[in-house]
């Protein structure tokens, strides 16, 4: 009996030694220590052993069970550790690998231009004001001295939403009218209103059915064209550099009298003449003028007391000049390659 136990022990320990993984050791354990295994069988035989030998045999059997259990447990632990190590190694993150490049967004180029212009005007005490894009004919045209049937409406044909009265605003000028009416006719005004505008134009390199204007209005006493010129001069130098010169040329708008076009000296050729300025040395960037007395009156300001100037920049035009963009459609076609070109110009991308 003693020998049987001894040789069983050696056999099991040897087999434990030869196992390769968790699965094998678990299977081996069932074979030897399971219900139908040799150790259980020996335990069953214990009953038949004669009295004096029973005690010794019982002790040997207990030792065997203890030793084998321990041996199995140790090997199990060993394999568990090996597997854990393997898993940790295989799941290790290689921090030396270059990561996937994350595309970072950047502000829209038009928003940037608007913000730049806003900053200049805010520094001169202007407020930034919003107005509705869906506008009434009354504000978009009538109050601005453009009655129904006036030929000036042809150039600003737009999209009508309801009869002839509700439309997509063709200019930001109705915000002037709204602000004057809200002000009650007795306070000076200094505002700019950037925003989207719409016209029924066929899209081409210089026309877009949607575009952006930055309108400005100043109402006070004794306002003259020289105030407009001085203001424009400050803005132009801030946007296009200190050597930028400005000039006003006569023009015609229904809501201003006199009306002017405001030009900047060509920043590309310094007035020598080039493609950008069409060889004139000057670039037109804004329409403007002294607010027409009818507009003041229509909007509750007494023209014998109050005067003012107004102007309108095209945001796309400013951006096209500043960034050398050739086609206005670029802003609205959401082509990521174009967008990232702008970002690169601004130094937001590294390649
Ligand atoms: N609203 C004009 C346009 O769309 C631009 C403009 C010209 C605005 C003169 C003004 C202004 O406020 O005084 O063509």
Image: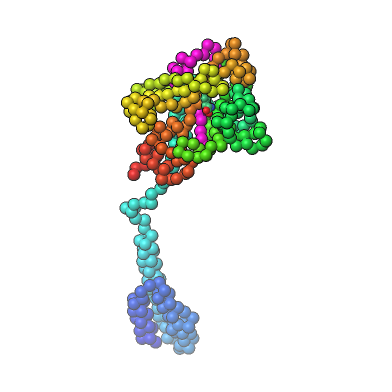
Q: Is residue 317 or residue 341 the one in the foreground? A: 317
Please tell me which residue is depicted at 54% across the width and 34% down the height of the picture. Answer: 196
Reply above or below: 257 against 162: above
Inspect the magenta stretch and tell me whether residue 229 lies in it. yes
Quadrant showing the N terminus: bottom left
Can residue 216 be seen in the rendering of this structure?
A: no
Q: Is residue 185 left or right of residue 348?
A: right
Residue 74 lies in quadrant: bottom left
Please tell me which residue is depicted at 43% across the width and 84% down the height of the picture. Answer: 38
| Colouring used for the render | rainbow
Please tell me which residue is depicted at 60% across the width and 37% down the height of the picture. Answer: 159
Quadrant showing the C terminus: top left
Can residue 49 be seen in the rendering of this structure?
A: yes
Please tell me which residue is depicted at 42% across the width and 86% down the height of the picture. Answer: 53
Q: Is residue 58 left or right of residue 218?
A: left
Q: Is residue 28 or residue 200 the one in the foreground? A: 200
From the top left corner, tell me how far across and down residue 226 is, in percent.
46, 14
From the top left corner, tell me how far across and down residue 57 is, in percent.
42, 83
Q: Is residue 206 or residue 223 the one in the foreground? A: 206
Outermost residue toward the right?
163
From the top left corner, tell me how far across and down residue 289 is, in percent.
51, 20
Total numbered badges shown on the rendered structure:
0
Inspect the magenta stretch and tell me whether residue 116 lies in it. no
From the top left corner, tell me how far across and down residue 86 is, in percent.
36, 64
Task: Tell me which segment is drawn in magenta.
Answer: 210-232
């Amino acid at each position: 009996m003693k020998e049987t136990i001894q040789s069983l022990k050696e056999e099991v320990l040897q087999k434990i030694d030869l196992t390769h993984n968790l699965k094998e050791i678990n299977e081996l354990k069932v074979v030897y220590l399971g219900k139908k295994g040799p150790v259980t069988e020996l335990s069953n035989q214990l009953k038949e052993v004669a009295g004096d030998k029973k005690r010794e045999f019982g002790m040997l059997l207990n030792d065997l069970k203890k030793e084998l259990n321990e041996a199995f447990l140790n090997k199990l632990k060993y394999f568990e550790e090996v597997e854990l190590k393997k898993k940790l190694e295989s799941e290790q993150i290689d921090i030396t690998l270059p990561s996937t490049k994350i595309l970072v967004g950047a502000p829209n180029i038009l928003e940037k231009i608007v913000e730049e212009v806003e900053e200049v005007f805010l520094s001169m005490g202007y407020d930034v004001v919003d107005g509705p894009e869906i506008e009434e004919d009354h504000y978009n045209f009538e109050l601005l001295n453009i009655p129904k049937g006036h030929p000036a409406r042809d150039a600003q044909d737009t999209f009508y939403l309801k009869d002839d009265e509700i439309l997509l605003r063709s200019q930001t000028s109705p915000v002037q009218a709204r602000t004057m009416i809200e002000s009650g006719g007795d306070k000076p005004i200094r505002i700019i209103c950037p925003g989207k505008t719409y016209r029924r134009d066929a899209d081409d390199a210089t026309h877009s059915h949607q575009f952006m204007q930055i309108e400005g209005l100043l109402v006070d006493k004794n306002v003259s064209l020289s105030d407009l010129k001085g203001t424009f001069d400050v803005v132009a130098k801030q946007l296009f550099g200190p050597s930028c010169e400005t000039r006003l040329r006569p023009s015609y708008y229904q809501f201003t009298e006199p009306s002017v076009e405001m030009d900047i000296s060509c920043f590309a050729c310094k007035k020598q003449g080039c493609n950008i300025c069409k060889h004139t040395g000057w670039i037109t960037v804004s329409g403007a003028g002294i607010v027409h007395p009818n507009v003041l009156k229509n909007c509750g300001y007494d023209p014998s007391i109050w005067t003012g100037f107004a102007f309108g920049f095209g945001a796309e035009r400013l951006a096209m000049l500043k960034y050398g963009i050739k086609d206005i459609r670029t802003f609205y076609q959401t082509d990521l390659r174009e967008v990232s070109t702008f970002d690169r110009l601004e130094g937001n991308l590294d390649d």
